Image: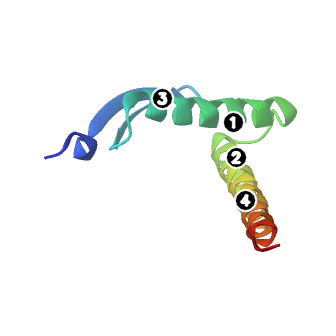
Amino acid sequence: MKSKDKINKVNVRIFDDEYVIKGSADTYHIEKVASLVDQKMRQLCQKNPYLSPKKVAVLTALNIADELYRLRDDYDALIKLLDETKQS
């Protein structure tokens, strides 16, 4: 088994719950991702304190997915612009 194929097992805390995350990414990356999710959930909860934890989780997932799609669109536009610049 290659070192990059190694499965890491990381204990993280998200929104006051403990999770064991398994993945091929390094421990630091997994912890950063979990920390981002926790931070986004807490920000949403501060603005909407009466939401259930389940709704906070779903709305956070939607917000992160929206951010991902917007970044992908921006990336695609930049790649297209770069290609056009190379051709001229």
Badge number at residue 60: 2
Residue 52 location, x and y as percent? Answer: 70, 42
C-alpha gap between disc 3 and disc 1: 15 Å
Q: Amino acid at mark 2?
A: Thr
**Residue beneath label 1, please?**
41
**Residue at the (24%, 47%) spot, across then down:** 5
The residue that appears at 76% across and 41% down in the rendered structure is 51
- Give SS at disc 4: helix
Instruction: Give the spatial CA distance, label 2 vs label 1.
Output: 6 Å
Residue 70 lies, with reference to residue 32, above or below; the image says below
* Residue 88, numbered circle: none
Q: Which colour scheme appears in the figure?
A: rainbow
Image-quadrant location for residue 81: bottom right
Work out how far the residue at label 4 is from the one at label 1, CA to CA, in angstroms: 26 Å
- Tell me where residue 7 appears, x and y as whole percent: 26, 41
- The image's mark for residue 31 is 3
> Residue 75 — which label?
4
User: Separation of disc 2 and disc 3 at Cα?
Assistant: 17 Å
Q: Amino acid at mark 1?
A: Met
The CA distance from mark 4 to mark 3 is 25 Å
Please state, as top left, top right, bottom left or bottom right, where the C terminus lies in the image: bottom right
In the picture as drawn, the residue positioned furthest to the left comes out as 1
Q: Secondary structure at mark 1?
A: helix
Toward which corner of the image does residue 62 lie, by quadrant?
A: bottom right
Q: Nearer the viewer, residue 34 or 74?
A: 74
Q: Are marks 4 and 3 in contact (CB under 8 Å)?
A: no
Out of 58 and 34, give the one closest to the viewer: 34
> Please, which residue is most extreme toward the right here?
47
- Of the numbered discs 4 and 1, the one sitting upstream in the chain is 1
Discs 4, 1 touching: Cβ within 8 Å: no
